[in-house]
Image (cartoon, rainbow, N blue to C red):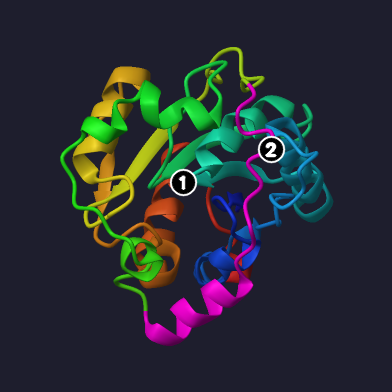
Amino acid sequence: MAGFALIHGAGDVGWYWHLVEAELRARGHDTVAPDLPCEDDAADLGDYADAVVAATVATLGQSTELVVVGQSLGGFVAPLVCERLPAQLPARLMVLVAPMIPAPGEAPADYWADTGYEDEPRERYDDPVELFCHDVAPELTAEAFRRSRVQSGARLGEPSPLQAWPDMPTRVLLAREDRLVPAAFVRRVARDRLGITPDEIDGGHTPALSRPGALAERLAAYAGEVGTAPDPARG
């Protein structure tokens, strides 16, 4: 059995992962998807990571093989979570989905300039639905926007406390039709910063809503590659 700590992106909530959670639990795994304190002007990346660690320890206990998954801005949080988990609940694998991929000490607000994002060939979309949820069912899109929160930028200009990339297996999973972080951009940044060739999935920037079954299948397969396995009694 694996446990999955699922980290949402900017201005979002843990609900974003609810369909993936159902798919993973049906496969015999445990999950936790906490809300980050993204509306709090006083909260920094360390506070985001601490919220995930606290929820993970409280929900998944001390005996689970843990996979940490970060979506979008959650890519800045996931490596901090891996560093801060207690010894009795170590992460075995980190997965970044449609991600921002930070460099040590980088501020999230500097990411776009540091990675040459504005020079990347891509289409521009003013409509947030077309940018984030163009392939999501209308009813799910409406609920996602109803639940969304204002992302505070008060402390996103501060350097990340990340000193070095965690020494553990890392996977990057890009979405081929992502309009926010296009596939070519993610391939380049993953190669330059991590020396990783990303895996790929169909869909846009929010595959947990548009393709939860396919995403869960990928995550479960990744867990199996590092020795985690579902509990047959839970299947």
The mark that comes first in sequence, 1 or 2, is 1
Q: Give the residue pinned by disc 1.
A: 72
Residue at x-position 72% and y-position 45%: 52
Depicted 163 relative to depicted 48: above or below: above
Q: Residue pushed farthest bottom?
A: 139
Residue at x-position 36% and y-position 57%: 205
Does the rendering let one see residue 90?
Answer: no
- Badges 1 and 2: C-beta atoms under 8 Å apart? no
- Residue 143, percent from left and from top: 54, 80
- Residue 146, percent from left and from top: 59, 77
The disc labelled 1 sits on which kind of residue? Ser
Number of marks drawn: 2
The disc labelled 2 sits on which kind of residue? Ala
Q: Residue pushed farthest top?
A: 163
- Magenta span of residues: 137-158
Depicted 67 relative to depicted 179: above or below: above
Residue at x-position 58% and y-position 29%: 79
Tell me, yes or no, whether the highlighted magenta stretch contains residue 19.
no
Q: Give the residue pinned by disc 2.
A: 154
